[in-house]
Image: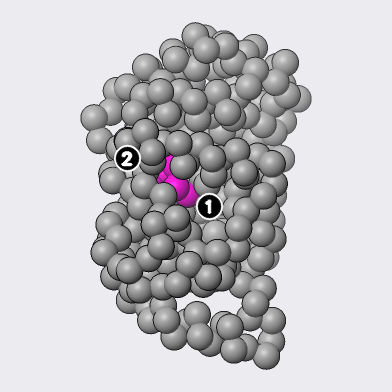
Amino acid sequence: MSNQSLERIKQLKLSLKEGVVSSNLLVFEYEDNPFLVNEYIKEIIKLRKLDVEYYTKDDDLLQIIKERDNSLFGGEDKLIIYTCDEFKIDLSKDTKDVIVVCKGCNAIVDLDCIYHFSKLESWQVIAYIQAHCKGLSIEECTWLYNNISGKYKNNEGIYRVANEVSKIDCFDEKEQSKIFNEISDNNGYSDLSQYNIFNLTNAIVKRDRLNLIKVLNDIESIDVDSYGLMTILHKSFKQVVDIQLGKNVTAQSMGLSDKQFNAIKYNCGKYNQQELIERFEFLTSIDYKLKSGLLDVDSSSLIYYIICCII
């Protein structure tokens, strides 16, 4: 990342911290991974407080903007997020409430609108951990990076880090170091049980009772980590909620690959809207109680309790 690009991103970050964000066109250009771009977009959405609509290269962006701006029914209250590989549509800097996410920009666009995100580096991932887990020391953040993200040579590492960060950042800062060590001591950052947890989660989300019985038989004698189970199960239901109940949701907007997005989309419809919301609220409650120490049960009991309440 060039010094100029880095400085502009730092300025944007500072503006967001101060609660200031322009409504003018933003073009976020990334090299290998849109994860950090999506983090900035989340903050912008919080500040702008607008309805968000997601579009892709298959949509006519100029027509969408025109219809929104000419709408008689509050179109000015919508933020458009458009994702594509190569952006070729010429837009004025004064185009309001449009964010473009792309791998390359070959359009005539004011350079002040473009923010270039280079390939993720280790210090950026560690900085992400520090930002979300302020109660951890720099040594603990570095350890988490080396033992999670550092294992992966592709783009998967940052998403694994985000998954582990979600286990910690729901706690007060003063408790985070303690929680970090408890999860570490219980091998909660290990990949050893991930295969069984994935199969179990998949069966529950799909309401696949036959496969669920098979998975339970397979893992009966295997120790499945409670933290890992709850994190993945909670995240899986959250993704189904976002896709099934969301509007114009895309793989890009959720930070997923097309393959991951389509797999989750395939699971939609197994629960109706009310059932989905009730089960997500149930899992949120269990997740909080487990991580805050209010629920002290062994993994086996937790698994059967969740299955009885969800399936």
Who's the residue at 57% across and 11% down the image? 137
Q: Residue reaching furthest left? A: 153
Which quarter of the figure has residue 147? top left
Amino acid identity at mark 2: Ser
Q: Nearer the viewer, residue 146 or 42?
A: 42
Q: Nearer the viewer, residue 238 or 74?
A: 74
Q: Which residues are magenta?
A: 34-38
- What percent of the width, then of the height, locates residue 290? 67, 28
Tell me which label, 1 or 2, sits earlier in the chain.
1
- What percent of the width, then of the height, locates residue 26? 48, 59
Q: Are marks 1 and 2 in contact (CB under 8 Å)?
A: no
Q: Nearer the viewer, residue 307 or 96?
A: 96
Secondary element at tag 2: loop
Compared with 189, 209 (above or below) is: below
Amino acid identity at mark 1: Ile
Alpha-carbon distance for marks 1 and 2? 17 Å
- What percent of the width, then of the height, locates residue 266? 39, 63
Q: How is the image coloured?
A: one colour
The residue pinned by badge 1 equals 41
The numbered dot on residue 219 is none
| Residue 78 visible from this viewpoint | yes
**In the rendered view, does 269 fall on the left or right side of 23?**
left
- What percent of the width, then of the height, locates residue 311? 57, 53
| Magenta stretch contains residue 278 | no
